[in-house]
Structures are given as C-alpha cells and as structure tokens.
Amino acid sequence: MLQTPPPEQVLTEIEDVFRIYGDMIFRLARLHTDNRQDAEDVAQDVLIRAMRNTKPFESPEHQKAWLIRVTLNCARTRMTSAWKRHTVGETGLERAAEEPEDFSDVYQAVHALDEKYRDVVHLFYYEDYSVKEIASILQTTESNVKSRLHRARETLRERLKGEYADV
C-alpha cells in the first residue's frame, strides 16, 4: 500500500503548479491546438481542473504526469468540439502573424506529425520522460511508445532531409 507523503512534499498550491508546470502545460497545449488562444484556453482549463482536484498526489512526478494527461485530454476536447468544427479556421497569414519567430523548422515538423507521434516526441525530447513513463502517461505499452518514436523519427528525417545535415 502506498503511503501519502507529507503535504509539504506534494505541491498543492495552484500558484506553485502554475509557476513550475505552466510553461510545460502551455507548450503541450500549443503543440495540439491551432493557435495561441486555444492553447491558453486549454492551459486555463487544466489549471482549473488542478484547483478542483481533491485527490492527493503520490509525488511531484505523479502530479506532473496527471497534468500532462489532463492537458492532452483538454486539448483533444477543444480541437474536436462542435464549436471548433463549425468555425472558419485561421488563414496562414493570421497564424504566421501570431507565431513567435523562434519556432524552428524542427518544431513545425513535430507539430505537423500525427497526434500520437507528436505526444511521444514531445514527452521524450522536451519533457525528458523515459519510454516506460510515457507508456504509463499515455496508457499504452512500452513497445507501442518505442514504435511511435521510431516512426516519428523516420517521418521527421524525411521531412527535414536536406535542411539539417546530421538528420
């Protein structure tokens, strides 16, 4: 049976959650949404859910994994909502005007991957999770995560061929 650590070891204040995990939540939401405003809305939804959560976390790692899972779920919900399906999308010029100039070709190539590949690439390379941890977060098998990583790397290698000499 798992023992709950003392409250001072587990983050409970929403300000701490936002300060520590806010950037991660936003980056992951941005990776799954069409624009910055949707990503901000997803991040806000995640933080509201974190405030409403009454179950204690076993550890900060458990809390981070929970936040990632909730972020992915909120982003999927937002992108498949009836409102999103029935609104006119942004034009390329509008989207380019809002994007920071520091989004690299690699980031854009990762953003263009299918969602299942995007998730594993982001969690593996940007959040430094192991294959085992990713499998737990995404509720899938380790071999599935390894396959997705392999396929994502192959796809990125093809898309970025010629742009980067060591790809």
Image (cartoon, helix red, strand yellow):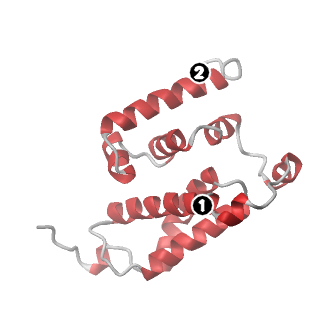
Q: Measure the C-alpha gap from mark 2 to mark 1.
A: 27 Å
Residue 48 seen in the figure: yes
| Mark 1, other Cα within 10 Å: few <14 / some 14–19 / many ≥20 | many
Q: Nearer the viewer, residue 4 or 80?
A: 80
Q: Nearer the viewer, residue 164 or 149?
A: 149
Q: Nearer the viewer, residue 124 or 79?
A: 79
The picture places residue 4, in percent across and down from the top left corner, at 21, 74
* Quarter of the figure with residue 56: bottom left
Label annotation for residue 26? 1
Q: Nearer the viewer, residue 27 or 9?
A: 27
Label annotation for residue 40? none
In screen coordinates, is 4 left or right of 91? Answer: left
The picture places residue 104, in percent across and down from the top left corner, at 70, 39
The picture places residue 123, in percent across and down from the top left corner, at 46, 46
Instruction: Residue at 32% x, 73% y: name it.
Output: 10
Instruction: Residue at 40% x, 78% y: name it.
Output: 53
* Residue type at tag 1: Phe
* Residue type at tag 2: Val
* Quarter of the figure with residue 11: bottom left
Compared with 29, 45 (above or below) is: below
Instruction: Residue at 45% x, 27% y: name it.
Output: 150
Residue that label 2 marks: 167
| Mark 2, other Cα within 10 Å: few <14 / some 14–19 / many ≥20 | few
The picture places residue 49, in percent across and down from the top left corner, at 48, 75
Instruction: Residue at 71% x, 53% y: name it.
Output: 34
The residue most toward the left is: 1
| Quarter of the N terminus within the rendering | bottom left
Question: Of helix, strand and loop, which one carries label 2?
Answer: loop
| Quarter of the C terminus within the rendering | top right
Compared with 109, 37 (above or below) is: below
Residue 23 seen in the figure: no
